[in-house]
């Protein structure tokens, strides 16, 4: 039996970024794109260039550096958006324009305020316009799983006629169930006369927890040959299909699916960690494949079984997906070359010598406080370094805090504001509350604190704490991440990092906000 190929289309940087609070800077996107290239996804959807100048720049930068994956950009179905997408992508070795327009009655009537005939014409014009500039064009009828099948057939036949090379069927609101969705893809391919001229793709949301099951049913029942997915299942609302889950399901159950992907599965855990560190979206411990407990056997019976024969309770190995045992890698006496070499082995490339020098200074500071430095410490350090923009308004100079059973917690901080030292102090309900109040007393951002979370980077009490702070102001939600052996210092760093993002005032449009022209 010959094995078929399945295309993995990663949309962490576009749909994933639409999760409230997951917005990323250009440098952060570049780091994730490089890791996705090491992971060997086929397509990286790098962003939505018409949404903001920042996203345009990020997509253009990714298009310039990525050589081993196709780089895609999303655009609404109008010439202006599509042209912006083309301009951002055209430096790439291999590139794709992905354009979309809603086809369900509800979306056409209530959101687009267009008739089905107008949608039909606009979809055709959009694909034609994109195809004139780019040989690789994907079309998505948004809310396809709630669209009338005859109307879908009419639109899809026409856009394939105009040259669409991939047809993607989104379950935009996570409404589908596996058998029905698989059947939908099968019927579309059967009814549309020119369906064999395009690759059929699926894009599922996880509102009912069925995104992975729906994607796999579309492959198995419907014959889809591209799955759109994100690392850690990041995405709008409840997220998208998890890349790690579909890839490992296809690989572990190859006997059933008989399909292969190009993915280097040993890069899955590093990719998951990087996305989690950058976005501040913590991976739940019991998450399949990438959760901290995914390969931990707690019960005596299971442990005994695994020791006797691993296969008794394990269907894949931790090493297959890139879990490595905590390793002491560097210490106080390690030099610049060893530091750079270890980062290289971890797949981390910093933009410039200056970036390495700054990270090395922070590494030495950390090694003074912590005798054993693990890979996880290095990744946390680099994540933090990369989160510091060159034009930041605020930076931490020094801080101290005091608390105890009888003292009211209090904190003092010195920060630089645009290069000038400012000092603040405050009391609070706890040491973290005191330091946040001290920072706010001078920053006066008025931002609302949506999330404060602390995670140990490695095991043991000597571990660094990695803190995520999510702030909201004027409809914008941003994340700041900070790491330190002292969790109050880590908290201050995370708060300051989030404040700097609030100050950066990047405005972006959500793709689902549909402008007609
Ligand atoms: O969920 C959705 O419909 C989308 C499309 C733009 C593909 O993300
Ligand atoms: Zn989506």
Image: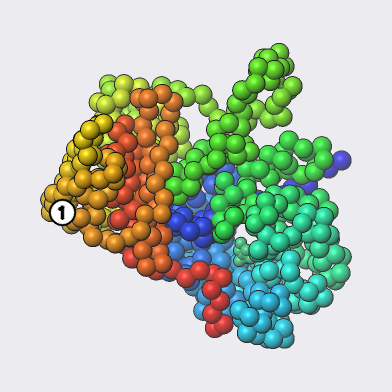
Q: Is residue 76 left or right of residue 457?
A: right
Q: Which residue is identified by label 1?
A: 419
Q: Position of residue 48 (x, y in %)?
A: 51, 66
Question: Viewer-proximal residue, 447 or 428?
Answer: 428
Considering only vertical position in the picture, is 207 above or below 262?
Answer: below
Rendered image quadrant of residue 107: bottom right
Report the residue at 27% width, 49% height from top: 436
Q: Specify the color scheme.
A: rainbow
Report the residue at 72% width, 29% height from top: 315
Question: Viewer-proximal residue, 20 or 92?
Answer: 20
Considering only vertical position in the picture, is 167 above or below 495?
Answer: below
Question: Viewer-proximal residue, 21 or 17?
Answer: 21
Q: Is the CB of the residue bearing disc 1 within 8 angstroms of ligand 1?
A: no
Report the residue at 51% width, 24% height from top: 325
Q: Position of residue 49 (x, y in %)?
A: 48, 67
Judged from the image, the quadrant occupied by ligand 1 is bottom right
Give the quarter of the figure containing the C terminus: bottom right
């Amino acid at each position: 039996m010959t094995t078929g190929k399945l295309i993995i289309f990663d949309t962490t940087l576009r749909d994933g970024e639409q999760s409230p609070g997951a917005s990323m800077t250009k440098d952060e996107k570049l780091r994730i794109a490089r890791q996705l290239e090491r992971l060997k996804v086929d397509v990286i959807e790098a962003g939505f260039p018409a949404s903001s100048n920042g996203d345009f720049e990020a997509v253009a930068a990714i298009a310039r550096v990525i050589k081993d994956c196709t780089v895609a950009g999303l655009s609404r179905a109008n010439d202006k958006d599509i042209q912006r997408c083309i301009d951002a992508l055209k430096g790439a070795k291999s590139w794709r324009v992905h354009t979309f327009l809603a086809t369900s009655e509800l979306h056409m009537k209530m959101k687009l305020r267009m008739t089905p005939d107008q949608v039909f014409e606009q979809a055709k014009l959009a694909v034609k316009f994109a195809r004139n500039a780019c040989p690789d064009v994907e079309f998505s009828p948004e809310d396809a799983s709630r669209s009338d099948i005859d109307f879908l057939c009419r639109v899809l036949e026409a856009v394939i006629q105009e040259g669409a090379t991939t047809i993607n069927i989104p379950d935009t609101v996570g409404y589908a169930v596996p058998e029905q969705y698989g059947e939908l893809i099968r019927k579309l391919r059967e009814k549309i006369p020119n369906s064999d001229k395009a690759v059929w793709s699926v894009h599922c949301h996880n509102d009912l927890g069925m995104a992975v099951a729906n994607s796999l049913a579309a492959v198995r029942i419907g014959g889809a040959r591209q799955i759109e997915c994100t690392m850690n299942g990041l995405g709008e609302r409840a997220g998208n299909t998890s890349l790690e889950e579909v890839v490992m399901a296809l690989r572990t159950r190859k006997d059933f699916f008989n399909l292969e992907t190009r993915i280097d599965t040993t890069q899955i855990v590093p990719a998951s960690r990087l996305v989690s560190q950058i976005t501040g979206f913590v991976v739940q411990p019991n998450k399949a494949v990438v959760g901290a407990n995914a390969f931990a056997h707690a019960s005596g019976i299971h442990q005994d079984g695994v020791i006797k024969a691993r296969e008794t309770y394990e269907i894949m190995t931790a090493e297959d997906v890139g879990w490595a045992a905590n390793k002491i890698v560097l210490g106080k006496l390690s030099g610049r070359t060893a530091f750079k070499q270890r980062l290289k082995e971890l797949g981390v490339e910093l933009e410039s010598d200056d970036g390495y020098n700054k990270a090395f200074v922070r590494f030495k500071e950390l090694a003074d406080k912590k005798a054993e430095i693990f890979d996880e410490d290095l990744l946390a350090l680099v994540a933090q370094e990369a989160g510091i923009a060159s034009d930041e308004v605020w930076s931490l100079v020094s801080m101290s805090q005091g608390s105890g059973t009888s003292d009211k917690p209090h904190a003092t901080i010195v920060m630089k504001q645009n290069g000038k030292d400012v000092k603040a102090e405050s009391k609070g309900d706890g040491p973290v509350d005191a330091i946040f109040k001290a920072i706010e007393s001078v920053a006066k951002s008025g931002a609302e604190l949506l999330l404060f979370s602390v995670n140990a980077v490695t095991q043991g009490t000597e571990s660094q704490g990695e803190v995520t702070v999510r702030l909201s102001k004027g409809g914008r939600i941003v994340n700041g991440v900070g790491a330190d052996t002292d969790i109050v210092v880590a908290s201050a760093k995370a708060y300051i990092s989030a404040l700097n993002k609030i100050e950066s005032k990047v405005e972006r449009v959500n793709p689902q906000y549909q402008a007609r022209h």
